Amino acid sequence: MNKPIGYWLKRLDAALEAQLDSTLSRLKLTRRQWQTLNTLAESTLRPEELDGILRPFWGDDIRLRERELAALVGRGMITMIDDRLTLSERGREKYHEAQRLVEAARQDLSMGIGLDEYAMALSVLERMSLNAERLAR
């Protein structure tokens, strides 16, 4: 079954999205909420900094971003301190809980794939992405 790389990339992307959605739904989190918690676990950020980091995942839909942030604020997971978004204690607990589930899922997804194979796949995908972006200009 010789399918082009685009076929496998789209199929993998759809499967990864479905698997992540299923994993996070156990914690009543969306993928975008997880990405927000994961990003804020590393550092506090101004809202515009968070937007810049997450734009590739959120797109330009401002209402979606506002809904997702409002949900996290409403559930007491993130707060604003000195014009910077930060995880609350509840948010940090939820982040660690989600991180454990996501890491277990990642291990399941890479079952039978050696570290060297995984690193090679990432390297090839990165180079192909850069080449495609360069050629699209």
Image (cartoon, rainbow, N blue to C red):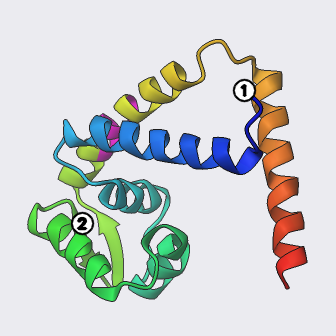
Horizontal relation, residue 97 to residue 136: left or right: left
- Along the horizontal axis of the image, is 1 left or right of 81? right
Q: Is label 1 in a helix, a strand or a loop?
A: loop
- Left/right placement of residue 80 relative to residue 101 reads left
Image mark count: 2
Badge 1 local density, few (<14 within 10 Å), some, or many (20+)?
few
Disc nearest the viewer among 2 and 1? 1
Q: Which residue is mark 1?
A: 1
Q: Which mark is residue 78?
A: 2
Give me the residue at 24% from left, 53% from top: 91
Locate the N terminus by quadrant: top right
| Kind of residue at badge 1 | Met
Q: Name which quarter of the figure residue 80 lies in.
A: bottom left
Magenta highlight range = 95-100
Q: Please tell me which residue lies in front, 95 or 19.
A: 19
Amino acid at the residue labelled 2: Ile
Q: Is residue 87 above or below residue 49?
A: above
Is the stretch drawn in magenta largely helix, strand or loop?
Answer: helix
Residue 5 covered by magenta stretch: no
Vertical position of residue 62 compared to residue 117: above or below: below
Determine the residue positioned at 19% across, 36% down. 26
Tell me how far mark 2 sits from mark 1, CA to CA: 47 Å
Q: Is 96 inside the magenta-drawn segment?
A: yes
Q: Earlier in the sequence, mark 2 or mark 1?
A: 1
